[in-house]
């Protein structure tokens, strides 16, 4: 006798069974659908060369980059949507900022709609990277899932301090300890009087201490996510969770004293990404206000660092003067410098690598701390500033080298496609997809959001820094897990000791439970 599924004999399925069957069928079709969408995007990538052939002057490459930036949001697994914190929108947008924002702004502000031949060559490289980014973001897109509240939220003990809370608290405090050790190695008084370039020089050989900021960021995001998960379930959060999250995030203001603006912005971005992945509704209006604030904050920090080491009053006056002197807030100096570096590398082809793929290999070797290996290879950005401006390099200055340029230096256009695709897949899209999965823990969500928050910073950087960040976050996760396990063991032993001290047969007595139970009844 053959067995047939319900419905084959005319017996209707239950509503729950029908929904489960449809969901299973949709999950089975999802890989094929995403593969088809990715292949379609790959076919559409041929549009750029066609447009450039007909329009010329870099217009075709520019329009193609804009198109590829929008495609992943249109081909999103959950349906077309443009939300700045969706992975399909966020990752391509951060790549766009690093390679195409400046030339697009130039075209919009010019009357001739014409770019130079140097721009054309650089935009061709940028377009290849945009194609890799669009294909990966489309292929890895997944529908948003509601978090497993029963697993993530202690509904029956909302005000209890969890083992994971203690683990992440230790991570944050360890990060603060490393940062304070770095400041102590400089001297507190001297730390507040250093120039911007001197802060870089003081950081050489102390990368382990400076990496404490990544530990603080992870702890801050975890506690914000923990607070939000409780509030979303309409539960009160423990005081420790609220105070720890706010304190760790506010500590990034100390980093602003050194003239670094990125750390605070990335910390806030990682909190936003984590909350969005958890399903918290963040209005686009607030995000737009946040972007405007970030732009003016960046302009102010530019002026602040110009007088760094000259006293707080002079720095504040310089920051205010820089804002007053800014004629067009759309012209962002940092983005212009990053793009110009890409133009220089593509057109002048400096000999920064001895053989193809050298910087990718060195990215792993540079993970060895410099005190352990004094003669370790120089990072590609260090080689670039030594080639471009040796005097600036000797003064401790640096020049951001984009990931598209690094890939191009290694293997030409193919190298750019490989590097951007790999970075998007391994370090940005997959972490955000896992952060939005139903059963991912709060620590896993916080880690994915922290790693992905550096997408812009690493599109404008190189593989070396991204590997260092990933390694540091992995170490922080390990510390959090081990600490939580240790706290769990201690808690259970203390509970067992309490039972032995008071006896296992202690009768239960509570006004809601009635009289204590009796062994004779």
Image (tube, grey):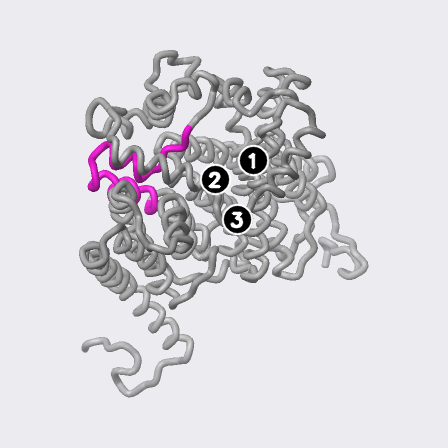
Instruction: Using residue 348 as the reference point, say whether residue 218 is left or right of it.
Output: right
When the figure is inspected, residue 61 is found, relative to residue 198, above or below; the finding is below
Residue 286 lies in magenta, yes or no? no
Name the N-terminal-most of marks 1 and 3: 1
Residue 263 screen position, x and y as percent: 54, 37
Tag count in the figure? 3
Residue 5, by quadrant, is bottom left
Magenta stretch prevailing secondary structure: helix
Disc 3: which residue:
328
Q: Nearer the viewer, residue 391 or 380?
A: 391
Q: Which mark is residue 333?
A: 2
Q: Quadrant of the N terminus?
A: bottom left
Q: Quadrant of residue 309?
A: top right
Residue 505 position (above or below residue 74): above
Q: Which residue is mark 1?
A: 302
Given residues 159 and 317, the one toward you in this image is 317
- Inter-mark Cα distance, 1 to 3: 15 Å
Helix, strand or loop for disc 3: loop
User: Is the residue marked by circle 1 packed among few (<14), some (14-19), or many (20+) residues within 10 Å?
Assistant: many
Taking the image as shown, residue 403 lies to the left or right of residue 317, namely left
Q: Can residue 114 be spotted in the picture?
A: yes
């Amino acid at each position: 006798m053959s067995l047939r599924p319900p419905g084959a004999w005319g017996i209707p399925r239950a509503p729950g069974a029908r929904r489960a069957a449809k969901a299973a069928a949709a999950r089975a079709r999802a890989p094929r659908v995403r593969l088809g969408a990715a292949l379609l995007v790959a076919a559409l990538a041929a549009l750029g060369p066609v447009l450039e052939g007909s329009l010329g002057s870099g217009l075709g490459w520019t329009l193609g980059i804009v198109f590829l930036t929008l495609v992943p949001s249109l081909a999103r697994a959950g349906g077309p949507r443009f939300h700045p914190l969706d992975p399909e929108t966020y990752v391509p947008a951060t790549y766009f900022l690093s390679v195409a924002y400046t030339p697009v702004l130039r075209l919009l502000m010019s009357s001739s709609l014409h770019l130079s031949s140097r721009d054309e060559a650089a935009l061709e490289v940028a377009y290849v990277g945009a194609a890799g980014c669009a294909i990966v973001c489309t292929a890895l897109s997944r529908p948003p899932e509601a978090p497993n509240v029963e697993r993530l939220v202690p509904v029956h003990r909302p005000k209890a301090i969890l083992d994971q809370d203690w683990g992440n608290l230790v991570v944050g405090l360890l990060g603060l300890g490393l940062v304070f050790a770095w400041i102590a190695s400089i001297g507190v008084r001297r730390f507040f009087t250093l120039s911007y370039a001197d802060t870089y020089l003081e950081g050489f050989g102390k990368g382990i201490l400076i990496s404490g900021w990544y530990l603080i960021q992870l702890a801050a995001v975890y506690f914000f996510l923990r607070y939000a998960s409780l509030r979303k379930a309409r539960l009160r959060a423990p005081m420790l969770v609220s105070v720890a999250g706010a304190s760790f995030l506010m500590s990034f203001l100390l980093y602003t004293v050194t003239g670094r603006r990125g750390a605070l912005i990335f910390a806030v971005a990682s909190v936003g990404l984590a909350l969005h992945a958890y399903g918290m509704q963040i209005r686009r209006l607030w995000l737009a206000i946040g972007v405007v604030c970030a732009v003016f904050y960046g302009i102010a920090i530019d002026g602040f660092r110009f007088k760094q080491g000259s006293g707080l009053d002079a720095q504040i006056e310089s920051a205010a003067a820089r804002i007053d002197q800014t004629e067009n807030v759309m012209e962002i100096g940092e983005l212009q410098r990053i793009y110009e570096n890409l133009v220089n590398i593509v057109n002048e082809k400096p000999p920064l690598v001895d053989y193809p793929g050298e910087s990718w290999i060195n990215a792993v070797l540079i993970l060895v701390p410099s005190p352990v290996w004094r003669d370790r290879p120089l990072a590609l950005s260090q080689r670039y500033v030594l080639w471009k401006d040796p005097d600036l390099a000797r003064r401790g200055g640096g020049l951001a080298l984009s990931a598209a340029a690094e890939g191009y230096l290694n293997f030409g256009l193919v190298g750019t496609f490989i590097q951007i695709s790999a970075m998007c897949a391994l370090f940005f899209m997959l972490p955000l997809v896992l952060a939005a999965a139903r059963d991912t823990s709060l620590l896993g969500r916080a880690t994915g959001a922290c790693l992905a928050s550096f997408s812009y910073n690493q599109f404008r950087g190189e593989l070396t820094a991204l590997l260092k960040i990933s390694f540091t976050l992995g170490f922080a996760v390990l510390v959090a897990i081990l600490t939580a396990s240790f706290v769990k063991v201690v808690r259970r032993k203390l509970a067992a000791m309490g039972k032995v001290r008071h006896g296992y047969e202690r009768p239960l007595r509570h006004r809601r439970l009635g009289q204590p139970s009796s062994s004779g009844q």
